[in-house]
C-alpha cells in the first residue's frame, strides 16, 4: 500500500512541484469565496481575484493529470455558471453531478440549498470510468 503524505502550503506553489502528467484522478473542494465562517477558523474565505485564482489552480491540475486523467470539483450551487465556464475552458466537461447535502447551513434571508454540484471532467475523450 502506498504511503500517504500531507503537504501544507500555498496550493499553487505546491502543485508546481509535482511532475507533469503524474496523476490519474483529482477530487477537490476549493473554498467558495462566499465569506463563510468555518466554525471559528481564522481562514478568510474571500479573495478579490478568486476566479483568476481558480483558473490558475485548474491549469496546474490539468498539467498534473495524465492524458487519461479525470477531475471532480465540488463547489457552490450559487456559482455554477462562473465555475462551469472556467472548468470547461480547461477540461473536457463530462457531467454535472448533484450531491444532496442535508447538512448545509440554513440561511436566514434566502432559501436553503440542499445540494452542491460536482463538476466531472477529463483531459481527453479516453479516460477510465468506474461508476
Image (cartoon, rainbow, N blue to C red):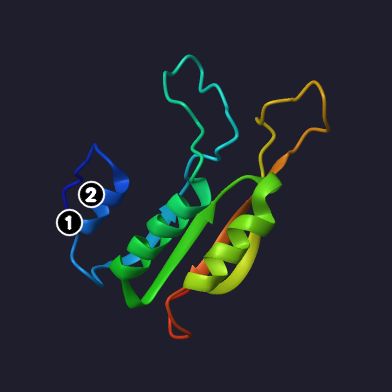
Pointer 2 and pointer 1: residues touching (CB < 8 Å)? yes
Residue depicted at x 39% and y 55% = 57
Question: Residue 92: where, in percent of width, then height?
Answer: 52, 76
Q: Which residue is mark 1?
A: 17
Q: Quadrant of residue 67?
A: bottom left
Judging from the image, what secondary structure is the residue with disc 2 in? Answer: helix
Crowding near the residue tagged with mark 2, few <14, some 14–19, many ≥20 C-alpha atoms within 10 Å: few
Residue 56 spot, x, y in % from top left: 39, 58
* Residue 67 relative to residue 77: left or right: left
**Which numbered dot is residue 77?**
none
Residue 49 visible somewhere in the drawing = yes
**Residue at the (24%, 49%) spot, across then down:** 13
- What element does badge 1 sit on? loop
**Label 2 – label 1 distance at C-alpha:** 5 Å
Within-10-Å neighbours for mark 1: few <14, some 14–19, many 20+: few
Dot 2 corresponds to which residue? 14
At a point 69% along the width and 47% down the height, the residue shown is 77
Question: Which quarter of the image is occupied by the C terminus?
Answer: bottom right
Residue 21's image quarter? Answer: bottom left
Q: Closest to the observer: 47 or 98? A: 47
Residue 116 in view: no
| Count of numbered marks | 2
Amino acid at each position: 500500500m502506498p504511503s500517504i503524505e500531507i503537504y501544507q502550503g500555498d496550493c499553487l506553489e505546491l502543485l508546481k512541484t509535482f511532475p507533469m502528467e503524474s496523476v490519474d484522478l483529482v477530487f477537490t473542494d476549493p473554498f467558495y469565496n462566499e465569506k463563510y465562517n468555518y466554525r471559528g477558523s481564522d481562514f478568510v474565505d474571500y479573495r478579490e481575484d478568486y476566479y483568476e485564482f481558480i483558473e490558475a489552480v485548474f491549469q496546474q491540475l490539468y498539467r498534473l493529470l495524465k492524458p487519461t486523467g479525470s477531475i471532480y470539483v465540488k463547489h457552490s450551487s450559487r456559482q455554477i455558471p462562473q465555475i462551469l465556464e472556467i472548468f470547461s475552458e480547461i477540461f473536457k466537461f463530462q457531467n454535472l453531478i448533484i450531491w444532496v447535502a442535508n447538512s448545509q447551513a440554513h440561511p436566514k434571508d434566502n432559501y436553503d440549498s440542499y445540494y452542491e454540484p460536482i463538476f466531472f471532467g477529463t483531459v481527453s475523450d479516453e479516460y477510465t470510468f468506474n461508476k
